[in-house]
Image (cartoon, helix red, strand yellow):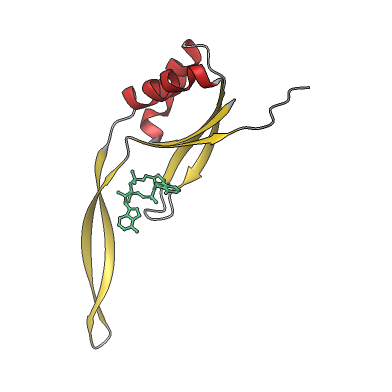
Amino acid sequence: MKLILAIINHDDAHSVIQNLTKGGYQVTKLATTGGFLMVGNTTILIGVDEDKMDAALEIIGTYSTSRRQVVPTTSEVGLGFYSAMPVEVTVGGATDFVVSDDQFRKF
Ligand code: 2BA
């Protein structure tokens, strides 16, 4: 058994989860926040048998899209003055972690 933790964009969450569920996977959705942009994203947990793991990752990849996002940052330009310097970053598709789940029990 493996546990997939996938961090995806809020806007993709519905179609990713819908297609995983359609494929027979059980999914738990968490509302999370990225530490860099400090904006909301979605983390999904999927417990899968090893032989179904690649197909789950494939679904996540198919329905997750990457986006360019502008982040306002401020930097000191001297004498206590600050200038706003927008920085553009590419966010996602999906960031996936796969961990071994040595114990899985359901009561
Ligand atoms: P955030 O931390 O809000 O990061 C959003 C995007 O900002 C990242 O996209 C990346 O393009 C950029 N970024 C993040 N940290 C940066 C830094 N120190 N310097 C410059 N640019 C930076 P993604 O890499 O696609 O990540 C999307 C979200 O996935 C992240 O949101 C975070 O919530 C999660 N994530 C990504 N890698 C992770 C990791 N190694 N561990 C835990 N969470 C991760």
In the picture, the quarter occupied by the C terminus is top right
How many marks the image carries: the answer is 0
In the picture, the quarter occupied by the N terminus is top right
- Side of 32 where 107 appears, left or right: right
x, y percentage for residue 103? 69, 31
- Side of 31 where 93 appears, left or right: left
Q: Quadrant of residue 74?
A: bottom left
Q: Quadrant of residue 68?
A: top left
Towards the viewer: 87 or 57:
57
x, y percentage for residue 8? 40, 35
Above or below for 88 versus 50: below
Measuring 49% from the left and 37% from the top, which residue is drawn there?
43
x, y percentage for residue 11? 36, 31
Above or below for 42 versus 85: above
Towards the viewer: 89 or 101:
101
x, y percentage for residue 19? 43, 16
Please, which residue is most extreme toward the bottom here? 79
Measuring 29% from the left and 31% from the top, which residue is drawn there?
65
Above or below for 75 versus 26: below
Measuring 49% from the left and 17% from the top, which residue is drawn there?
52
